[in-house]
């Protein structure tokens, strides 16, 4: 199928010689497979990208949501985003600052909230740092298992973003803007690449057992894009997807009979209404919904994994000493589910580690070391396990793994042992498809407070992620409000080429 | 051709975006992070301080610092900046007060000096200034003849229906316009829809609910034009009409009842705006009046409770109580008003001109700020509570809407409580600085309680309020950045539409009050005089000669009847939108709308009585399919899926559970634990409603921005973050899961089964027959009855858990025919 960019289009010639209605016959209506009515088209939805050569190239009118190749050869075909909600402390984990250790207790002037510069006391890290692996990258003893994976990671230490506050920072980290209402990264990828498995959502979100992040669903919304692109919340226990099992107590056989009756009656209806493919699409949706009831639980069934694999993710580890720590079990299960999902064709999995407020997540206002003792044991082994497992299965080369929060933390103390929010300098790391392993990029100043060398705004991080997945961030656009909207917005952005293969 | 035009424009955008990349004169572009540094750290200093004397019209010492070239060229004493070399740059010496002392008003802050040094060190990065986008100067932006000739800016005029051959088909001029294009292509219009399909269509379109079997029978028995016409009148007189059409308008005004973001707090009293809109449609309030009330209901000669509530329009948007930058957030709020007003009433994307001249439409950046200037004195939603947080600006966003008697009672209570309030206030003022926090809190609480007591019976509306004269200054913000104010502008209407200055007269609440007027109360309550600007803006928008207003509204109405507007981009009548398929028809409708007194109900009837509306939706005309698969010509009606509300409400209607109660704060359907778990505080801000309350129409469901009811979200509900004129329609498996498996579907199927048993007894075929008539408005065919019978033959579960009839009811609620309109 040609991508339609070079084809003359008139309403009469239609879409590759077919009518708009006809192409819906082929569109399918899977979990993310959307049969979009002409309404979208009317809104310029298709017009903005078909024919113009703007993105996603290859997304032609003929197959609105079929999986499509990325416009550029991409190493990463899917992505697992490990979101450390609350804002993990860079100078206690990856960003070693000997000068900060030396100057502990000294007073410095720092901007603690936008435009508010006050004298504050430097707080050294209680963690011990060492260089690891052949790359000699720094990692603290808070993350002993991840320390063993440093040769796989590209660590970016000089990121900046635009907000000192959780809600707008979370929203910006996810959608590129501090204002609510724009599609998030996962939605962009879902829109740009389509789905590889109609029986599962293309963009899955998993939440911490302690609760959702601040601003909740606004973090995985599709904004002005159709809701079909938004994240689907998947639970690792109980009913995995909303409404997956019938509310009434009927068995599978009975439900099969129901769906068959629906199909039979819909077929009668369809027969008298030729030419409307959305009706066929809706019939397909019922078939898929029925199948989903078995495919989704299967994807989540960790008993199908070997004991060794389960152990690799820390599923059987005893709980760490801190009484607030959940241990590695819950996050380990989610990481393992993430692997099973991407194996089955899910494009984008985002796991929120940390929920609720304060020490329920990485928001270490009162005592940063205490906070690390809660959360580091929860993620350390699962993440190391995930990286190892992906590598062993040959999946790491095609999977982009991203680690980071909505911002970092201050080099100075808050309530004597805690650290406040810091959007001016913080760390992310990436690994896997399209990423150079074992390198560091950028530096914060000598105390770890503000990005100083190779400082990069998170729109560059977004551009990097899109690049790794085969997109030019300038061209992945969605026509809305009279403009080709982009994840990276109107300000120029540039991928961090130094960490890309 | 529309598609190609849009496509071409997209290429232009792409090209412009590239062209705007920062370039070094004759060299490679500066890296984005350096440009970012310049924009965030350097430009604010240059624009905020240096350019006062060295930019624009003044260049003291011959020096300008408003472009890289000028800074490098320098002034009377040579170059000011030597790229890469702070030591050699006189500007750096001057700001360090070595020799020259700049700025003379006082040394820059260390951070600012640091930034300038760093900037020079980097080589003085500066984005390539696209003359159009960076400069606020009007001279750079010319409105061309071509701009003026653009269809949407043409006067509506007095279009005449064309002469057509098949005149006999036409029921009214709408049909003549449609037929003219069909004739030109040689495509014939579809025959009329079957009466039972037509009645279903008109019920859903007007009231969003299905007809009862009895109503269907009555109409099918006598489907004459007269019956049809009186049916329309009947539906228009039902209160469900306003609930249906009010909801469409609520999409346009981005209605929701919370602020979004972390706390996602309630917008108190916002429900009154929803009820106002519903009532306005039911009362057939003329659209021009409707506009004026929402934009300037407080500035009317005699404001009413209704008109005050209407101004809640300004307060419905998202609002962050913990913005990173309070100054920027204040402008975001004004921006939100500009964008919503532009999209809702004018079909323009004014927001595009916040940072630069509009890329497609003749809207210079200055016009954006002139438009924003109309809202300059509007009190902000929040006020600073601390360096990091804002608190709701209660004194600036609420207005009492009490009756005269309630107001009198308030006044006497105020007199009564005055001594107590005064004494507590004194107590608070006299608290020693070192007083215990708890003690202070106690006194503050006491004061709040007294004030609450004083205002207890005074109903309030979420409304617009102004801060009082003089008009705050509005400056063009260079690149939309609050830190870089440019030229000062005054309120003015859009240049492309004449660009006149408003003749605004400030509105005081103390004068010219008639008996029983609300004004004395408002004055007494502390309302400041307004600038009268919004009233002028409203009058200009609602003017019969404004070429956009009526066109945009009739297009919105048309869209609800045909599944698409005559202009498919209902919110964008600009060049990046989609041109009208029937421009003359649009103009004719607009003229008819205006001349008919802006009456929406009259417009409904016009359209509903046309043959075009009443056509069958069958897509079988081979010539039509071959020549016009998209139905650009309207040779048939469009098959349409019901929206979220109509699907939910019809389920309630047929199950017999629909609670017709109107108005109020809103109802809370139960949300599963899993849904609540997406919140950082599970369950926070979600209330409880009785089962009866839960069965009210969807328009009354409480709208919480970060906790959307799954039924809505799954069925393509509106995005409440901005004005939405057209909802997308998707078909995805989760919709099937919801209608098959959710508690709601299960419960409605159970009630429906009870109803069918009650009405049809235990005989299978009568149950099936009744079920089809109740839900689909028709009897089943023999084949359908056979299929349904098969399911009913299943053996019920011993515990009553699996009831075959309930299963069949669920099946029917899931049918394509139940959710699609022919």
Image: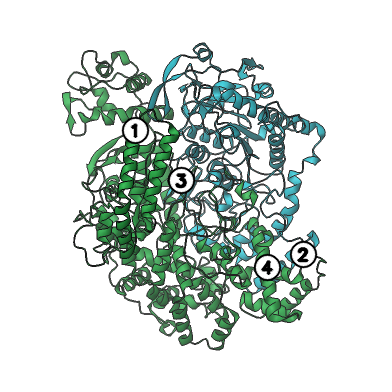
Give the CA separation, mark 1 to mark 2: 71 Å
Location of residue B89 in the rendering, given as x and y in whole percent from the top left corner: 28, 16
Rounded to the nearest whole Å, what is the CA distance between mark 3 and mark 1? 22 Å
Answer yes or no: is residue B758 visible: yes
Tell me where residue B622 sits by quadrant. Answer: bottom right
Residue located at (30% from left, 41% from top) = B132
Would you name the residue on which mark 4 appears?
B749
In the picture, measured across the screen, residue A414 lies left or right of residue B391, that is right
**SS state under label 4:** helix
Residue B703 in the image, given as x and y percentages of width and height:
50, 55
Front one among A500 and B755: B755
Say left or right for B785 vs B124: right
Residue located beneath label 2 in the image = B801
Query: Which of these two is toward me, B86 or A231?
Result: A231
Q: Are marks 4 and 2 in contact (CB under 8 Å)?
A: no
- Residue shown at 77% from the left, 64% from the top: B801
Q: Which chain is green?
A: B
Question: Any idea which chain is the cyan one in this picture?
Answer: A
**Which element is circle 2 on?**
loop
Tell me the quadrant of the picture where the N terminus of chain B can be found: bottom left
Residue under the image location 58 percent in, 74 percent down: B620
Marks 4 & 2 on one chain: yes
The answer to which of B290 and A137 lies nearer the viewer is B290
Q: Residues within 10 Å of mark 4 (few under 14, many from 20)?
A: many
Q: Nearer the viewer, mark 3 or mark 2?
A: 2
In the rendered structure, are the residues bearing label 1 and label 2 in contact, judged by CB atoms less than 8 Å apart?
no
Mark 4 or mark 2: name the one nearer the start of the chain.
4
The tag on residue A485 is 3
Q: Foreground mark, 4 or 3?
A: 4
Residue B582 visible somewhere in the drawing: no
Q: Which residue is mark 1?
A: B128
Q: Residues within 10 Å of mark 3 (few under 14, many from 20)?
A: some
């Amino acid at each position: 199928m040609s991508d339609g960019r070079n084809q003359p289009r008139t309403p009469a010639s239609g879409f590759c010689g077919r009518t708009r209605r006809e192409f819906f016959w082929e569109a399918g209506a899977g979990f993310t497979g959307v049969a979009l009515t002409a309404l979208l088209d009317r809104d310029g939805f298709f017009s903005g990208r078909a024919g113009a050569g703007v993105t996603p190239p290859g997304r032609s009118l003929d197959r609105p949501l079929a999986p499509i190749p990325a416009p550029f050869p991409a190493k990463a075909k899917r992505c697992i985003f490990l979101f450390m909600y609350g804002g993990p402390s860079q100078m206690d984990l990856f960003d070693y600052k000997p000068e900060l250790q030396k100057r502990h207790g000294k007073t410095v002037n720092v901007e603690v909230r936008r435009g508010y510069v006050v004298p504050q006391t430097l707080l050294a890290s209680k963690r011990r740092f060492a260089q690891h692996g052949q790359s000699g990258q720094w990692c603290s003893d808070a993350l002993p298992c991840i320390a063993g994976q440093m040769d796989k990671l590209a660590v970016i230490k000089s990121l900046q973003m635009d907000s000192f506050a959780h809600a707008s920072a979370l929203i910006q980290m996810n959608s590129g803007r501090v204002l609510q209402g724009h599609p998030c990264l996962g939605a962009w990828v879902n829109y740009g690449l389509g789905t590889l498995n109609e029986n599962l959502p293309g963009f899955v979100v998993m939440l911490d057992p302690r609760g959702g992040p601040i601003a909740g669903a606004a973090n995985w919304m599709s904004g002005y894009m159709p809701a079909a692109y938004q994240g689907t919340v998947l639970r690792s226990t109980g009913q995995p997807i909303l409404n997956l099992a019938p509310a009434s107590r009927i068995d599978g056989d009975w439900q099969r009979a129901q769906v068959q009756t629906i199909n039979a009656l819909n077929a009668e209806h369809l027969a008298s209404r030729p030419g409307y493919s959305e009706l066929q699409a809706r019939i397909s949706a019922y078939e898929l919904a029925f199948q989903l009831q078995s495919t989704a639980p299967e994807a989540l069934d960790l008993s199908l994994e070997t004991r060794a694999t389960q152990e690799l993710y820390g599923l059987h580890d005893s709980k760490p000493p801190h009484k607030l720590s959940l241990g590695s079990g819950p996050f380990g299960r989610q990481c393992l589910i993430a692997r099973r999902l991407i194996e089955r064709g899910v494009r984008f999995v985002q796991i929120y580690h940390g929920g609720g407020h304060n020490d329920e997540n990485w928001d270490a206002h009162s005592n940063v070391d205490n906070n690390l003792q809660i959360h580091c044991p929860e993620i350390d082994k699962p993440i190391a396990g995930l990286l190892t497992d992906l590598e062993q299965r040959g999946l790491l080369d095609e999977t982009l793994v991203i680690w980071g929060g909505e911002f970092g933390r201050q080099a100075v103390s808050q309530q004597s042992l805690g650290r406040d929010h810091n959007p001016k300098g913080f760390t992310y790391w990436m690994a896997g498809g399209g990423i150079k392993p074992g390198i560091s990029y950028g530096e914060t100043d000598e105390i770890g407070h503000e990005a100083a060398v190779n400082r990069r705004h998170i729109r560059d991080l977004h551009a990097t992620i899109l690049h790794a997945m085969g997109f030019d961030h300038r061209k992945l656009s969605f026509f809305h409000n009279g403009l080709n909207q982009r994840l990276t917005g109107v300000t120029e952005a540039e991928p961090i080429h130094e960490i890309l293969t | 051709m529309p598609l190609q035009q849009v496509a071409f424009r997209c290429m232009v955008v792409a090209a412009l975006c590239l062209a705007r990349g920062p370039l070094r004169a004759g060299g490679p572009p500066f890296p984005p992070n350096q440009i970012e540094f310049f924009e965030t750290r350097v430009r604010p200093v240059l624009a905020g301080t240096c350019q006062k004397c060295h930019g624009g019209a003044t260049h003291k010492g011959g020096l300008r610092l408003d472009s890289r070239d000028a800074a490098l060229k320098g002034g009377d004493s040579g170059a000011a900046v030597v790229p890469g070399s702070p030591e050699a740059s006189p500007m750096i010496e001057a700001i360090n007060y070595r020799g020259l002392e700049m700025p003379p008003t006082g040394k820059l802050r260390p951070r600012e000096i640091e930034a300038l040094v760093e900037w020079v060190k980097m080589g003085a990065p500066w984005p390539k200034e696209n003359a159009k986008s960076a400069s606020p100067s009007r001279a750079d932006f010319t409105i061309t003849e071509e701009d003026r000739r653009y269809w949407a800016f043409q006067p509506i005029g007095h279009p005449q229906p064309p002469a057509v051959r098949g005149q006999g088909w036409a029921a009214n001029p709408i049909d003549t316009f449609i037929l003219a294009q069909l004739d030109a292509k040689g495509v014939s219009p579809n025959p009329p829809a079957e009466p039972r399909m037509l009645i279903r269509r008109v019920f859903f379109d007007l009231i969003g609910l299905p007809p009862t079997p009895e109503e269907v029978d009555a109409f099918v028995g006598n489907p004459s034009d007269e019956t049809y016409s009186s049916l329309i009148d009947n539906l228009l007189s039902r209160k469900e009409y306003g609930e249906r059409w009010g909801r469409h308008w609520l999409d346009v005004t981005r209605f929701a009842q919370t602020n979004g973001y972390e706390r996602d707090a309630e917008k108190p009293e916002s429900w009154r705006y929803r009820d106002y809109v519903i009532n306005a449609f039911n009362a057939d309030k003329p659209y021009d009046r409707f506009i004026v009330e929402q934009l300037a209901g407080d500035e009317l000669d005699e404001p009413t409770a209704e008109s005050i509530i209407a101004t809640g329009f300004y307060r419905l948007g998202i609002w962050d109580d913990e913005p990173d930058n309070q100054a920027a957030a204040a402008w975001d709020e004004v921006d939100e008003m500009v964008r919503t007003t532009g999209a809702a009433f004018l079909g323009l994307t004014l927001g595009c001109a916040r940072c630069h001249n509009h890329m497609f439409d003749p809207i210079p950046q200055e016009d954006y700020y002139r438009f924003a200037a109309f809202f300059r004195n509007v009190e902000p939603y929040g006020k600073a509570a601390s360096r990091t947080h804002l608190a709701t600006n209660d004194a600036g966003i609420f207005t009492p809407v009490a009756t005269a008697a309630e107001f009198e009672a308030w006044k006497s209570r105020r007199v009564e409580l005055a001594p107590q309030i005064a004494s507590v206030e004194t107590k608070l003022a006299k608290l020693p600085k070192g007083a215990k926090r708890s003690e202070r809190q106690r006194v503050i609480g006491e004061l709040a309680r007294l004030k609450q007591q004083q205002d207890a019976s005074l109903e309030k509306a979420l409304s617009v309020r102004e801060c009082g004269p003089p008009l705050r200054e509005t400056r063009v913000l260079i690149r939309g950045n609050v830190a870089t104010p440019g030229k000062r502008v005054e309120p003015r209407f859009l240049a492309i539409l004449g660009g006149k200055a408003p003749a605004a007269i400030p509105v005081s609440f103390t004068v010219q009050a008639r008996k029983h007027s609300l004004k004395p109360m408002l004055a007494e309550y502390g309302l400041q005089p307004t600038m009268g600007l919004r009233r002028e803006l409203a009058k200009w928008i609602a003017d019969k000669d404004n070429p956009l207003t009526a066109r945009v509204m009739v297009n919105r109405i048309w869209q609800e009847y045909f599944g698409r507007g005559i202009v498919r981009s209902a919110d964008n009548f600009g060049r990046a939108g989609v041109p009208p398929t029937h421009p003359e028809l649009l103009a004719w409708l607009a003229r008819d709308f205006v001349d008919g007194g802006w009456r929406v109900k009259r417009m409904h009837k016009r359209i509903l009585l046309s043959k075009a509306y009443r056509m069958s939706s069958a897509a079988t005309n081979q010539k039509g399919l071959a020549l016009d698969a998209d139905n650009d010509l309207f040779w048939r009606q469009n098959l349409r899926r019901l929206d979220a509300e109509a699907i939910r409400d019809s389920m309630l209607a047929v199950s017999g559970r629909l609670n017709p109660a109107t108005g109020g704060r809103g109802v809370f359907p139960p949300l599963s634990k899993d849904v609540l778990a997406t919140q950082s505080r599970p369950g926070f801000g979600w209330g409880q409603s009785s089962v009866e309350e839960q069965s009210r129409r969807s328009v009354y469901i409480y709208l919480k921005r970060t906790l959307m009811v799954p039924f809505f979200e799954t069925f393509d509900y509106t995005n409440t973050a901005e004005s939405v004129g057209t909802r997308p329609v998707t078909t995805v498996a989760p919709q099937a899961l919801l209608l098959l498996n959710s508690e709601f579907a299960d419960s409605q199927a159970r009630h429906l089964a009870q109803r069918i048993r009650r009405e049809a007894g235990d005989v299978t075929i009568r149950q099936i027959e009744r079920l089809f008539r109740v839900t689909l408005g028709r009897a089943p065919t023999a084949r359908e009855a056979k299929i349904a019978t098969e399911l009913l033959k299943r053996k019920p579960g011993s515990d009553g858990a699996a009831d075959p009839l309930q299963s069949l009811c669920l099946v029917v609620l899931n049918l394509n025919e139940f959710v699609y309109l022919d």
